[in-house]
Image (spheres, rainbow, N blue to C red):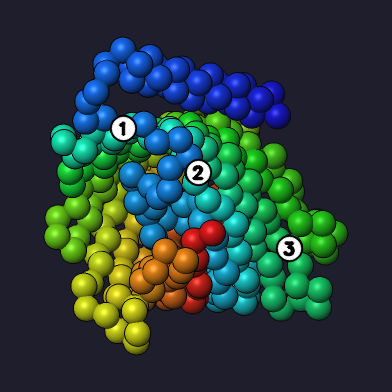
Amino acid sequence: MFGLKNLIIRGSLVIILFTSFGQAQETGAGEQTREKIFMPIGELFTPLIADPKQPQSFISFRKYNTPIANVWAAAVGYGESFGFMRWEDKLADKAFQVGIDGALFAQFNMETASKDLVNADYTIGFPFTFRHETFSFRVRLYHQSSHLGDEFLINTKPERVNLSYESVDTTLSKDIGAWRGYAGGEYLLQKEPSNLDPAMIHGGLEWRGKRRILGSGKPIAGLDLKCYEEHEWSVNASFVIGLEYVRLKPCQRKLRILIEIYKGHAPHGQFYTDRISYLGMGIYFDL
């Protein structure tokens, strides 16, 4: 918790600094092409559709293959990213934004009588994003803490690992027509257990079709790859394919229906040492 407190203080100070700097620039520069937007709508760095740890809201039913058992599980997420301030230069087609994001990722064992909560991961972060034409970039400071469910603890009596860390991740993205490629990495600044190796490299591809299918749905697919130093750089692969229902009116929400395939080390809390795979279907939506 001490690390989380420091992260929140540092992130808040950086946001205040950028906001004050932007105000000073605007006050002294007079008329110009730049615009400052308080509490902007939308993201400069489009969320990664295949990243299992992307802050977003969803419900998914999956068949998990784990070292212990093969089970049906429900995975749910509740998360969003909110911009505090955005600076746009419309003439140069570039913008910078500071914000905050948070998420909860939880897994429930659907084969138990009480649908036991197995694990819950909580994240809070401060994303700093930049977009120029077809390039976008994100630097994110964030905290994660993980907790096992009470019923799971009582029924299985696992050896508990207090997984908690503060991290910085960076991702550069490039749009090329219907395709998007991205690459970056992550480094743990503070961590528990203290012997966790700190580095990770990250990359992926996304594709968005133009033709509408089944109403306003458009085909979409994504491949996300992560390699952790902790796992001796073995590949953890997440693949999704499905339909994205875009907003046709401002009052509508965006919705994605995705088939999900994952193979690699578990992205769920203290189970990070377990190699797993799953196949499922999920509904993802914007708040």
Give coordinates of residue 4: x percent, y percent: 64, 29
Q: Residues within 10 Å of mark 1 (few under 14, many from 20)?
A: some
In the foreground, 191 or 22: 22
| Location of residue 186 by image quarter | top left
Give coordinates of residue 31: x percent, y percent: 24, 23
* Disc 3, SS: strand
Q: Amino acid at mark 1?
A: Glu
Q: Residue at x 51, y 56 (%)?
A: 56
- The relative height of residue 54 versus residue 17 in the rendered view (above or below) is below
Q: Amino acid at mark 3?
A: Leu
Give coordinates of residue 83: x percent, y percent: 46, 40
How much space separates mark 3 and mark 2, taking CA atoms?
28 Å
Residue that carries the numbered disc 1 in the rendered image: 35
- With 112 as the anchor, is 90 left or right in this view? left
**First along the sequence among labels 1 and 3:** 1
Q: In the displayed image of the protein, which residue is found farthest to the right?
A: 154
Q: Amino acid at mark 2?
A: Phe
Q: Residues within 10 Å of mark 2 (few under 14, many from 20)?
A: some
Residue that carries the numbered disc 2 in the rendered image: 82
Give coordinates of residue 274: x percent, y percent: 55, 56
Q: Quadrant of the C terminus?
A: bottom right
Q: Can see residue 217? A: yes
In the foreground, 131 or 71: 131
How much space separates mark 2 and mark 1, taking CA atoms?
18 Å
How much space separates mark 1 and mark 3, taking CA atoms?
46 Å
**First along the sequence among labels 2 and 1:** 1
- Do the numbered discs 2 and 1 sit on residues whose CB atoms are within 8 Å? no
Q: Residue at x 39, y 69 (%)?
A: 249
Residue that carries the numbered disc 3 in the rendered image: 117
* Disc 2, SS: strand
